Amino acid sequence: MTDTLTVPPTALEPLPGQAPPLIDLRSDTVTRPTPAMYERMRTAALGDDGLDGDPTARELEALAARTLGKEAGLYVPTATMGNLLAVLAQVRRQGQVVLESSAHMFLTERGGATLSGTAYVGLAGAAGAMDLTALASALRPSGALPTELVCMETTHVNAGGAVLPLAHMQAVHDLAHGAGARVHVDGARLFNAAVALGVAPAVVARHADTVSICLSKGLSAPAGAVLAGPAQTIARARRLRKMLGGTQRQIGLLAAAGLEAIETMPHQLAHDHATARRLGDALRTLRPGVVGITAPITNIVFVELPDAVPDSAAWARELAQHGVLIRPWGPRRIRLVTHRHIGAACIDTAAEGFRQAARALLG
C-alpha cells in the first residue's frame, strides 16, 4: 500500500456558488452514506423487528456474525448500547468488569454500571493494552467482587487509535477464561484494527466471546452497531435490548446501509490511515519542540499542547476561523480523525489552517 492520496469520489463537494466546505476532522462519525447505501435503503425489504423480525436487519446481523466469526449478531442503535448489552448479558449483579483504565467503556460509558449493578474496575496499561500482571491479580479469587468480564478496546481511541497486538489479546483471553471470566471487545473501530494488522476481522474478534462494532464511523453508514457472540448470549441480549427500548420496528431502512458498509467499505480504511500519516507529517513541521504531534497507527492524530500555550478550546475557535473543525480532547490535547471525505487537498487546507492558527496563538 502506498501513501498516494486522492480525493475519494464521494467526498463532500460544494455546490456552485457555495463556499468550500469546512475540513471536518472532529470524528469519522461525520461521514455521509454512499450513493450505493442510499439506493440500498430505497429498495430494502422491511418488517417489524419487534414482531416478526425485519428481514434486512436479520440479514445484517447474520453478515456481521459471519464476518466476525461468531454464531449470532444483534443490530443495536449504538455501540454504547452494544457494550452495555454485552455486560448485562454476561455479568451477574455485583459482578466485576475489568477494563484498561483509559478505555472508552471505562472513562465514558461506565455510567452503565448504574443500570447493570456491576462494578467497573480500571487497570493500568500502556498504549491501550492492560497490564497482564494486574489482570491476573484482578482475576484471582478474593473477598472482593468476582471478575466476570474482561473488556478490551481496539482500536483504542484514547491511545491515539492504537491497535492491540494479537498476542496480547490472546493472553488476555487465556487469563480470563482460565479464571472463569468471559471477554468482550469494544470494537467500534475493529475494522480499522484489522486493516492495520493486515488480517480478517474474525482474526481480531476470535480473542473475545462477544464483540461490538460500529457501522457509522469509517464504514460510513448513517447509524447503528452490531453486537456479536454466542447464540445463547445474543438471544439474552435481544431480550435485554427490548427492555432498554432498543427495538426499532422497520429498522431495515438503516440496516440496509449497514450491509453495504460491511460489504464494501473496509477497503476505504487503508486510505484513511494513509491520510492520517500525511496529516501527522504535515503538522509535525508546525512548531517543532513546542507542539507535539503523535505518529498515527490508524486514523487518529493527537496534537499535544504544552502548558505554556493556549488551550485546546482556543485552538478550536481559531481553527474554525480558517475552515478547520477539530475536537478538543481535554485542555491540552486535540484529536484529529481522518475519514473518507478527507483527501490530499483537505490535508493541505488543514495544515495551512494550523499554520495560521499557530501564528495567531503562538506569535
Image (cartoon, grey):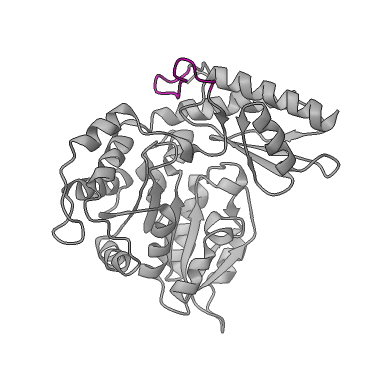
**86 in relation to 127, above or below:** below
Res 38 → quadrant: top left
Q: What residue is rendered at 53% in x and 32% in y? A: 338
In the image, residue 123 lies in the stretch drawn in magenta? no
* Residue 34 as seen in the image, left or right of residue 100: left
In the displayed orientation, state which residue is furthest to the front. 17
**Magenta segment boundaries in residue numbering:** 7-20
Q: Measured from the top left, where is residue 313 in percent x and y?
A: 71, 43
- Between 317 and 144, the residue placed more toward the observer is 317
Q: Quadrant of residue 336?
A: top right
Q: Position of residue 142 (x, y in %)?
A: 56, 81
Residue 102 seen in render: yes
> Residue at the spot x=50%, y=73% of the render?
114
* Residue plotted at (81% across, 41% down): 306
User: Which quadrant, please, contains the C terminus?
Assistant: top right
Q: Residue 333 location in percent, x, y?
A: 70, 43
- Using the rendered view, name the quadrant where residue 234 is placed: bottom left
Q: How many marks?
A: 0
Q: Is residue 14 left or right of residue 162?
A: left
- Would residue 323 appear left or right of 56 to someone viewing this image? right
Position above or below: 220 against 61: above
242 up-or-down from 5: above or below: below
The outermost residue toward the left is: 52
- Is residue 15 within the magenta segment? yes
Give coordinates of residue 270: x percent, y percent: 46, 28
